[in-house]
Image (cartoon, grey):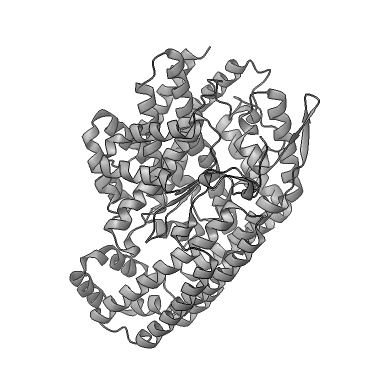
């Protein structure tokens, strides 16, 4: 379980960022060109966007500027995500981010000027260039929340500072927190954020697992007040911006760009709390029985109820994914092969690497996936998930303009989770024994649904309560945040397990809180993704409907995209059906695991 330095790891396990820019010298060179083209754009268009033809020309140039900004910004940001101990990379990120922010501030006049255009002019532009249909609809929708040009410029100027809480949180988490070692069974064990979240939470030795849990949260305790201060700074900024733009609440402000109604948002949280919790309490009892635990605690809940690891090498993992996702056709398969062969994926497990897994998809480039491959079959499911994001961007970026390429955050996790479920259904079909079947069923719950319908759901439920407190002007401190999170845990798990000391600090572990109302969208996306996966499993030809939906990008709002994929989220029926599916998996697991 030794964690190496970045330079000690073979390049084959690292992503190739040279596809974005060969090196920092090229980044600097392209930045200079970008600054010059920005000045030309300002000179030619500022104060002159008055009709549909000028609007269309200005939009095309603005797109090109934003695309180059995305490519260069991704190049330096991903370097840091892979190794936050590399001071040179951090300095380059700060430098490039500052310049890109200045460029974005300078061209902010474009947004202010197009917001002033009469709807008739915008409609004419849409008739001339139908690829901008959704973008123009968004301009019209956002008009009433736009401030004056000077006020918008002030906000844009300050925008870089709005990222300080997120950056501060990550630096504290990934570089400043030193966990040292902990003792279990008379032996010393090394501890870090990555080691705890990737290994110790799943450790089968109860003493090691629980002692790691205790030591990890004791270190979090040391940082709780500063983390709460950083988080509160972020919350207050969101609240202020929401008020400035005329939204009735911070939640309304954050839902607006997602194109999601409060009813749809609240339904996702409330239905899961009511209907999923009983199934998961039964699941907790399965784990307790499977491991013969003296008691069931939250420190034990990440255990795989099957109890045996399925190991796999990287080549076999790749082949599983290619076969499991074969219903998507040859074009999708070629994309998957390229991702593995041309190093779109960073699989290293090194000191300073960002925890978890993610997919970054800058427009104008292929995607980049960060993960950590430890030789387990569960790692293959993680890769299939992230490749789902890559596939969605692969199609939307080819078919849609920049401003219409990224679907609502509500929909973002649908392609990734659909891939994950399709892979699991593939493995389930190929299970030859009850043991094989039990392993797959355990993965479906312990990995896919626990991660999205429990872990991130808890975060979303807690997050809603925090925003209510914020808008009610209640005091928010580390202790109140801990209290809210613990109450959320207790409400969901009831008496099915014990909440150990330190569990209330789980709110400190997730960067998603600095990304708006992101956590609840995992279960929202998985609701759609599950229905899509089950449809494809039943009828493989349905995969074409799904690929066609991915090509739409942000052409429709979440409800429209879901409808295009054959899922009606205007009611809670898909969500309740998915919860019933989870319940059936748990019931079968209960019979197979003794």
x 36%, y 54%: residue:
407
x 35%, y 76%: residue:
115
Q: Is residue 568 left or right of residue 204?
A: left
- Asked if residue 360 shows in the view, the reply is yes
468 or 181: which is nearer to us?
181
In terms of image quadrants, where is residue 118? bottom left
Residue closest to the far left:
127
x 47%, y 21%: residue:
439
Number of numbered tags placed on the structure image = 0
- Up/down of 166 relative to 318, above or below: below
- Up/down of 39 relative to 424, above or below: below
Residue closest to the far right:
186
Q: List x then y, in percent, for residue 301.
A: 59, 28
In terms of image quadrants, where is residue 534? top left
x 60%, y 37%: residue:
198
- Asked if residue 475 shows in the view, the reply is no
325 or 318: which is nearer to us?
318
Q: Is residue 465 left or right of residue 58?
A: right
Q: List x then y, in percent, for residue 338.
A: 37, 46
Q: List x then y, in percent, for residue 491.
A: 57, 34
- Up/down of 435 relative to 512, above or below: above
- Up/down of 517 relative to 122, above or below: above
Q: List x then y, in percent, for residue 387.
A: 40, 44
523 or 204: which is nearer to us?
204
Q: Quadrant of the N terminus?
A: top right
Q: Is residue 451 left or right of residue 197?
A: left
Q: Is residue 195 left or right of residue 366?
A: right
């Amino acid at each position: 379980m030794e964690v190496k330095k970045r330079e000690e790891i073979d390049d084959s396990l690292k992503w190739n960022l040279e596809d974005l820019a060969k090196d920092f010298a090229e980044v600097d060179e392209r930045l200079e060109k970008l600054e010059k083209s920005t000045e030309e754009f300002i000179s030619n268009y500022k104060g002159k966007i008055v009709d549909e033809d000028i609007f269309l020309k200005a939009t095309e140039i603005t797109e090109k500027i934003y695309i180059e900004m995305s490519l260069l910004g991704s190049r330096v940001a991903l370097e840091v995500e892979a190794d936050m101990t590399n001071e040179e990379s951090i300095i380059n990120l700060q430098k490039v981010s500052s310049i890109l922010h200045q460029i974005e501030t300078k061209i902010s006049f474009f947004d202010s000027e197009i917001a002033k255009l009469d709807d008739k002019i915008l409609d004419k532009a849409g008739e001339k260039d139908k690829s901008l249909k959704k973008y123009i609809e968004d301009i019209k929708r956002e008009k009433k929340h736009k401030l004056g040009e000077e006020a918008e410029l002030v906000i844009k100027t300050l925008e870089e500072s709005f990222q300080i809480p997120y950056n501060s949180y990550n630096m504290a988490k990934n570089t400043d927190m030193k966990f040292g070692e902990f003792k279990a069974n008379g032996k010393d064990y090394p501890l870090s954020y990555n080691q705890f979240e990737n290994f110790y939470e799943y450790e089968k030795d109860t003493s090691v697992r629980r002692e790691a849990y205790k030591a990890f949260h004791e270190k979090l305790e040391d940082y709780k007040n500063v983390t709460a201060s950083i988080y509160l700074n972020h919350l207050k900024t969101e609240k202020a911006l929401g008020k400035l733009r005329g939204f009735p609440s911070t939640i309304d402000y954050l839902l607006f760009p997602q194109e999601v109604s409060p009813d749809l948002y609240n339904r996702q949280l409330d239905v899961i709390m009511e209907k999923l919790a009983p199934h998961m309490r039964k699941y907790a009892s399965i784990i307790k029985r499977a491991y013969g635990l003296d008691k069931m605690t939250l420190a034990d809940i990440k255990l795989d109820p099957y109890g045996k690891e399925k190991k796999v090498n990287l080549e076999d993992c790749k082949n599983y994914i290619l076969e499991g996702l074969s219903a998507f056709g040859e074009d999708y398969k070629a994309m998957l092969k390229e991702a593995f062969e041309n190093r779109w994926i960073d699989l290293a497990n090194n000191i300073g690497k960002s925890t978890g897994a993610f997919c970054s998809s800058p427009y104008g480039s292929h995607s980049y996936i960060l993960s950590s491959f430890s030789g387990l079959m569960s790692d293959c499911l993680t890769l299939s998930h992230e490749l789902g994001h890559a596939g969605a961007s692969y199609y939307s970026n080819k078919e849609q303009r920049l401003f219409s390429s990224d679907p609502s955050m509500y929909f973002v996790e649908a392609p990734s989770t659909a891939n994950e479920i399709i892979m699991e259904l593939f493995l389930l079909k190929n299970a030859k024994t009850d043991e094989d079947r039990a392993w797959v069923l355990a993965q479906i719950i312990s990995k896919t649904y626990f991660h999205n319908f429990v872990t991130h759901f808890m975060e979303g439920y807690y997050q809603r309560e925090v925003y209510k407190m914020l808008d009610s002007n209640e005091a928010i401190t580390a202790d109140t945040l801990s209290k809210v999170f613990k109450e959320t845990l207790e409400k969901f798990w009831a008496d099915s397990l014990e909440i150990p000391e330190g569990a209330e600090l789980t709110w400190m572990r997730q960067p998603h809180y600095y990304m708006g109302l992101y956590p609840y969208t995992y279960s929202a996306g998985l609701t759609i993704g599950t229905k899509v996966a089950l449809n494809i499993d039943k009828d493989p030809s349905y995969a074409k409907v799904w690929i066609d939906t991915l090509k739409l990008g942000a052409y429709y709002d979440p409800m429209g995209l879901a409808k295009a994929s054959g899922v009606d989220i205007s009611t809670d029926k898909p969500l309740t059906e998915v919860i019933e599916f989870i319940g059936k998996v748990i019931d079968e697991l209960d019979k197979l695991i003794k």
